[in-house]
């Protein structure tokens, strides 16, 4: 459909005209699909899951290769400075042993206190474990691909964590893989609090791998560099006491934190059931409320 | 030319590969599937590979594929890169139409004009993604979209070069 005048051939003129119509039809279809994905994104759950299943096994296999190569390099690096590292690790081990004894004492005390209070403990169960195998490349959204899907029991909306901290929550689930909305995505808002002092704060991603944290109460900026942010369990989706990030920079009414669970270095991610499924369900269907 | 006889390879009897009409669309799909690479990007500064390949082909040739193929190619891109479904369908079809209208107006083209046209298209791509992200609850300031835009504009010549090589290969030039 390139040439401006296709000549006298009636057939060529019609061909040009119909190719224009086809492109305009493509634009209209695109607009309709886009409108539907803005208004009712769950309409595409099935097809998005299927697309994930197609690519995720390949991504997973390649990820193995990449991490093996990375492992070789860091392994070689470790040999380079072995003597120094050994001495440092020994010192650290001594310090850790002392801390561990303290922690054990605190743990015991904690258990006794809880027993006297008769506090109900939430059992933490694991739905599935998977690897983070890929991510979104070039949009303002921050997604990661997790190598566990509905076959393992993963459902949309479940929180995902790693041993280091909170990773995010499931937004698309295929049979073999699922897509995770990372805590650094702008649309992911996590009710949380400061580990030091327990001041309630709100953590919201910034879309570039960092997290914005703001105190719930307006006033003095409660953050210090190095503060740890943990989930509060409010809202019922994320379990409480999961570390989210560490404050690296203060700004005028809040701070910027780096996620503790770096998806690029997270070996395993754990999918857990929503902390309070009843609360999440009530929030998801506000039409039921009077 | 007499000189041509001195070069070893004859140009007679060399014809385009039988699958030549499908090579451009296939390269666009391959570029789309680059998003399946196991790279975990925290900043999201990678270029939109599918769209880069798409406009590189369209700027090199007026008819790399039948115009209506833009919509299904865009749908494939949406599915595999995790964009909202419909974003690339709309953008890629609109790109076909816009470049066709531009082709009717411009008298001549050179590398610089192509690069400028590509930069404008990539900027529209980034702007649209930013706008749709804002509508779906992830509004970030627009300056955060500038680094990926600059990177994709810088990558365009590379993509155009690769596409030109693939084109020469499929036509057995």
Image: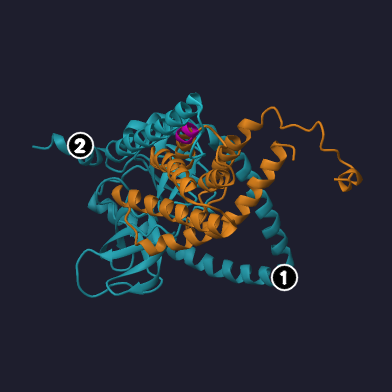
Chain colours: A cyan, B orange
Looking at the rendered structure, which numbered label has been put on residue A83?
A: 1
Which residue is under mark 2?
A: A285
Subunit bearing disc 2: A
Picture quadrant of residue B29: top right
Subunit bearing disc 1: A
Numbered range of the magenta stretch:
B67-71
Neighbourhood count class around disc 1 (C-alpha, 10 Å): few under 14, some 14–19, many 20 upward: few
Q: Residue furthest left?
A: A290
Q: Position of residue A72 (x, y in %)?
A: 70, 54
Tell me: residue A246, above or below residue A19.
Answer: below
User: Which quadrant of the figure contains the N terminus of chain B?
Assistant: top right
Compare residues B106 and A221 and report the one nearer the observer: B106
User: Which quadrant of the figure contains the C terminus of chain B?
Assistant: top right
Neighbourhood count class around disc 2 (C-alpha, 10 Å): few under 14, some 14–19, many 20 upward: few
Tell me: residue A154, above or below residue A267.
Answer: above
State which tag comes first along the sequence, 2 or 1. 1
């Amino acid at each position: 459909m390139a040439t401006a005048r296709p000549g006298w051939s009636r057939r060529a003129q019609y061909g040009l005209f119909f190719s224009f119509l086809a492109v305009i039809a493509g634009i209209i279809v695109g607009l309709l699909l886009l409108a539907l994905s803005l208004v009712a994104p769950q309409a595409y759950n099935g097809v998005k899951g299927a697309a994930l299943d197609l690519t995720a096994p390949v991504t997973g296999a390649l990820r193995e290769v990449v991490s093996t190569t990375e492992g070789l390099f860091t392994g070689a690096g470790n040999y380079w400075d072995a003597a120094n590292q050994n001495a440092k690790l020994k010192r650290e081990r001594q310090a850790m042993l002392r801390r561990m004894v303290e922690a054990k004492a605190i743990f015991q005390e904690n258990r006794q206190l809880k027993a006297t209070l008769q506090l109900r403990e939430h059992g933490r169960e694991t739905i599935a474990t998977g690897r983070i195998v890929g991510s979104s490349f070039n949009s303002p959204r921050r997604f990661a691909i997790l190598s566990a899907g509905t076959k393992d029991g993963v459902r949309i909306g479940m929180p995902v964590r790693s041993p280091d901290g909170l990773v995010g929550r499931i937004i698309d689930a295929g049979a073999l893989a699922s897509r995770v909305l990372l805590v650094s995505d702008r649309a992911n808002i996590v009710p949380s609090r400061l580990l030091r002092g327990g001041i309630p704060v709100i953590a919201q991603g910034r879309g570039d791998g960092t997290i914005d944290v703001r105190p719930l109460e307006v006033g003095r900026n409660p953050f210090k560099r190095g503060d740890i942010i943990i989930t509060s369990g409010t809202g019922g989706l994320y379990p409480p006491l999961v570390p989210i990030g560490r404050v690296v920079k203060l700004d005028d009414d809040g701070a910027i934190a780096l996620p503790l669970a770096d998806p690029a270095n997270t070996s395993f991610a754990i999918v857990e059931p929503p902390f309070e499924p009843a609360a999440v369900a009530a929030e998801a269907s506000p039409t039921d409320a009077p | 030319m007499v000189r041509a006889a001195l070069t070893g390879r004859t140009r007679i009897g060399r014809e385009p590969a039988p699958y030549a009409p499908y090579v451009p669309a296939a390269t666009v799909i391959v570029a789309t599937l680059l998003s399946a690479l196991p790279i975990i990007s925290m900043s999201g500064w990678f270029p939109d590979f599918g769209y880069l390949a798409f406009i590189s082909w369209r700027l090199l040739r007026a008819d790399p594929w039948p115009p209506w193929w833009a919509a299904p190619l865009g749908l494939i891109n949406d599915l595999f890169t995790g964009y909202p479904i419909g974003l690339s369908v709309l953008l890629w079809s609109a790109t076909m139409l816009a470049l066709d209208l531009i082709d009717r107006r411009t008298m001549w083209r050179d590398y610089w004009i192509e690069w400028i046209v590509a930069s404008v298209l990539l900027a529209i791509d980034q702007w649209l993604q930013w706008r749709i992200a804002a509508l779906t609850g992830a509004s970030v300031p627009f300056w955060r979209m500038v680094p990926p835009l600059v990177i994709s504009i810088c990558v365009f010549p590379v993509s155009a070069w690769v596409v030109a090589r693939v084109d020469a290969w499929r036509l057995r030039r």
